[in-house]
Image (cartoon, rainbow, N blue to C red):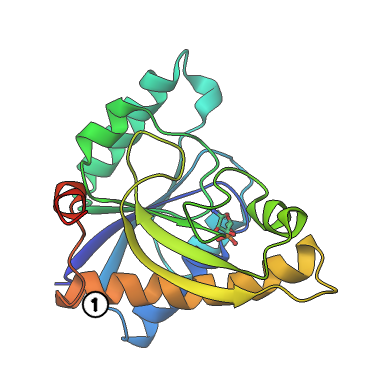
Amino acid sequence: MATLKLGVLVSGRGSNLQSILDAVQAGTLDAEVRIVISNRPGAQALDRAAAAGAKTCVVSHRDFASREAFDAALAAKLKSEQVEWVVLAGFMRVLTGVFIREMQGKIINIHPALLPSFPGIHAQKQAIDYGVKVSGCTVHLIDEGVDTGPILAQRAVPILDDDDEDSLSARILEQEHALMVEVLRGLADGSLQPPRRERRAAQG
Ligand code: GRF
């Protein structure tokens, strides 16, 4: 049985999901995608999951009266599939404490900037507008802030003089795909230990 039992939450294109599915399929990642959940019915990610033979499900946020009720339904679905790690792969909803406490320390997000710089949406455009020369991507654990949890790994990507949001996003995305799989591999084989906030704080 695979080491990492993953649930992947998606909202759109699903290219990061694809990189996970491809690595599992190729036998280079000891993981099993037990369920792919989308909050949007027509998400391309659902087609990618189905094509790879992964179980899919739509949990639409529109069907719930509150964020908390939506989050509780998501958590229940993941638990029913015996998911141990949750990957947010282009999941465009901010999760509340209800979900985060349920899956404490086991929720991984990928963000297209070098956090703590440029959290939130349009991170690539934020980086270009600011004028930084290097950006990149970050895989981190989720806490109750927006893009603020403990960092697992990062990759740097140069920003070129003629970059626009699209060209930079494409260059970063390539690195996202590799970084996501690298992190999951590290968690699967134990070579990557999730950082603990308390330990980092104690070290100053
Ligand atoms: C990626 O850039 C990811 O960093 C961000 O949303 C985008 C999702 O892309 N959180 P995809 O759906 O994985 O193709």
Residue at 28%, 35% (x, y): give it: 100
Q: Amino acid at mark 1?
A: Asp
Position of residue 104 relative to residue 111, above or below, is above
Q: Nearer the viewer, residue 110 or 12?
A: 110
Instruction: Determine whether, in the image, residue 201 is placed left or right of residue 77.
Output: left
Q: Considering the numbered disc 1 on the image, is that residue within a helix, a strand or a loop? A: loop
Residue at 43%, 74% (x, y): give it: 179
Residue at 17%, 78% (x, y): give it: 189
Q: Is residue 20 visible?
A: no
Residue 132 occupies quadrant: bottom right
Q: Is residue 49 visible?
A: yes
Q: Nearer the viewer, residue 64 or 98?
A: 98
**Residue 5: image location, x then y, percent:** 22, 61
**Residue 41: image location, x then y, percent:** 59, 41
Residue at which label 1 appears: 30
Looking at the image, the residue that sits furthest to the top is 65
Disc 1: residue Cβ within 8 A of ligand 1's nearest atom: no
Instruction: Determine whether, in the image, residue 192 is placed left or right of residue 180.
Output: left
Q: Quadrant of the N terminus?
A: bottom left
Instruction: Determine whether, in the image, residue 131 is placed left or right of residue 30.
Output: right
Q: Nearer the viewer, residue 57 or 148?
A: 148
Looking at the image, the residue that sits furthest to the right is 162
Position of residue 83 relative to residue 51, above or below, is above
Q: Nearer the viewer, residue 155 or 62?
A: 155
